[in-house]
Amino acid sequence: VHEKKQCLDLASECLTEALRIFKLRHYDVETASTLHAFGRVLGKKLDVKAATECFEESIRLRKQSLGTDNILVASTLHQYGVMLFKSHDDEKALLKLKEALQIRKSNQGDNNLQTADTLYKIGEIFARKNNYTMAINCLEKVLAARKNSLGNDNVDVSNCQFSLGVAYLE
């Protein structure tokens, strides 16, 4: 645990310095990428408030610099949604993940693994909220995409089958 915390502290130091330089030089794309990474680090450190600020600023900068339908915007929305899910803010997580899903579908299609990963998290939220019909609908699509891309014997396919089986039970 100490080693992991030390690595997160070192990551924070490095990202803080990178952020300072990128902001000073007005490098918005690099600033957004650094904020995305810093948001992930802060989320792992369980500093949800600071992570939220990083993710929201990263999303704003990425939308401004790259456009609202850019895959990097979707990546930050997805990571933000995952952090919110882990902190049990399901409503806000669902909003961020649905926005990420829309962008990923339009850029990468329904059978893309990143699209499936976002849909999987959405399915997990529905299951946690006891909305098993919606969870099953999401997870069946994820399973099809993962089998198509990874084959039947992949651990990600098995994890999805497990989640789907539990949802069917309920």
Image: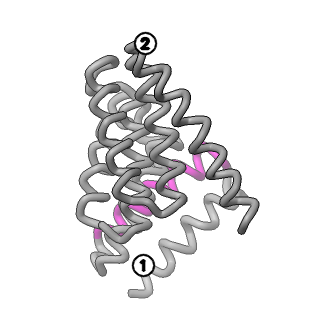
Instruction: Tell which residue pokes out farthest to the right in this image.
Output: 3
Quarter of the figure with residue 121 = bottom left
Q: Nearer the viewer, residue 5 or 107?
A: 5
Residue under label 1: 167
Q: Is residue 72 left or right of residue 97?
A: right
Magenta residues? 134-150
Q: Position of residue 160 (x, y in %)?
A: 55, 65
Q: Nearer the viewer, residue 89 or 14?
A: 14
Q: Residue furthest top?
A: 25
Judged by depth in the image, the label closer to the viewer, 2 or 1, is 2
Verify CB contact (< 8 Å) between mark 2 and mark 1: no
Q: Quadrant of the C terminus?
A: bottom left
47 or 95: nearer the viewer? 47
Q: Secondary structure at mark 2?
A: loop
- Which amino acid, mark 2? Arg
**Percent coordinates x, y for residue 72 in the rendering:** 42, 30
Q: Which of the image's four quarters has the N terminus?
A: bottom right
Snapshot quadrant of residue 108: top left
Image position, residue 101 (x, y; %): 34, 44
- What residue do we see at 31% from left, 26% from top? 61
The secondary element bearing badge 1 is classed as helix
**Where is 21 relative to 130, above or below?**
above
Q: Residue at x 29, y 77 (%)?
A: 129
Amino acid carrying label 1: it is: Ala
Which label belongs to residue 77?
A: none
Q: Which residue is mark 2?
A: 25
Q: Is residue 32 above or below residue 127?
A: above
Residue located at (43% from left, 56% from top): 82
- Asked whether 147 falls inside the magenta stretch, the response is yes
- Where residue 32 sits, quadrant-wise, is top left
